Image (tube, rainbow, N blue to C red):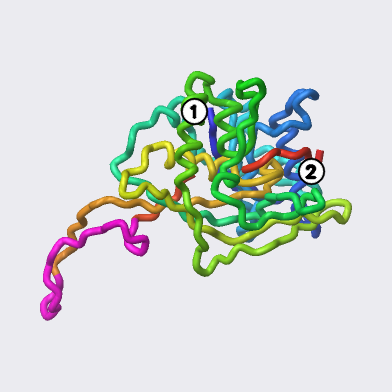
Amino acid sequence: MPRRWTVILRDRADTARPIRPEDCHGLLNHWWPQSEREHTAAKRWAMNGWPLPLGNRLYHWTLTWLDDVSAPLDPADLIGVPQRIGDHLLEPLSVTPTFERSYAEMLTSEPGPVTVRGAEVHALTPVVTTTRDNAGERIPHIWPTPRRLFGAVHRSGGEIVGGSGALGAVARFAPRDLATPWLEEALVELARVRRSPLPGEDVRLAEHAHAEKRTVLGWLGGLRLDHGTGGRRPGPTFEVLLELLELSGIGKYTAQGFGAVRVDTVTGGRVTVEVPAPRAGNAESNRPRRIGDRADLASVRSVSEPEEFGGTLFD
């Protein structure tokens, strides 16, 4: 089933060269090998960014396995066993599972006690989304529509044959009898989603240099997604879409660490919260405070390639 881990590693090597995305990708190809026929296809994992330094040779890394079939290797089995990433020798000190939920559970989930009405999406690594210019050349697309953020479903002869991104994960790995109707409902839900800028996190062009002096162009920043229901309560499909968005990432090369995002959901409802009585001399009366649908009072909690995969980057 889809799983996510947070890994803490210690670097046992003395090296000046920073950790590179292509080296991380090579390690995961070793952990979770695919057949030669699948080698250039979309991977079954998402590398949610690259190992981040915590200080004193410690690193933090988040990885996601997207297939409903269990991963060939659990990172927890490698605790204490140094792993080669380029010039670095990283030893896993701890592995914490942070997500473990099957597609059957996600696609058949019931509405929760609170309503998810929107989300703030924060790019953690450059997001690679492209479009074509008038000459037919691919150029960076730094303000993609909500529909493209969630990926694509590939069909042939009316049958689902694959996909990419959040939608593609369901198309590729979920049970077909559940995936087909759920994807139809998801496309209807996405047609209601509206995007808007996120104050203080302007979307901007970014570039990432990697091996052979090549540069990957993408975008960084944040945006707000809102479910335009016209007053109607959104169903659980929207919440699952946001969960999958964080798990799978956005855009191309998510298996190499690009397109990693954090999705903070914004909930609404009529939850009443009792607050303690004021101290003596406080003129404000002791009355329940009501949390409504306003974004500035909404509860925010963290949840867990919207386009063709378009080939490999490091393979």
Farthest residue, direction front: 134
Element under disc 2: loop
Q: What predominant SS class does the magenta segment belong to? A: loop
Element under disc 1: helix
Q: Position of residue 197 (x, y in %)?
A: 52, 63
The answer to whether residue 98 is visible is no
Residue density around tag 1, few if under 14, some if 14–19, many if 20 or more, within 10 Å:
many
Q: Nearer the viewer, residue 9 or 149?
A: 149
Residue that mark 1 sits on: 103
Q: Residue 284: within the magenta?
A: yes
Q: Position of residue 203 (x, y in %)?
A: 60, 63
- Left-right relation of 145 to 16: left
Residue density around tag 2, few if under 14, some if 14–19, many if 20 or more, within 10 Å:
few
Q: Amino acid at mark 1?
A: Tyr
Residue drawn 74% across the image and 41% down it: 25
Q: Quadrant of residue 106?
A: top left
Farthest residue, direction bottom: 281
Residue drawn 32% across the image and 44% down it: 233
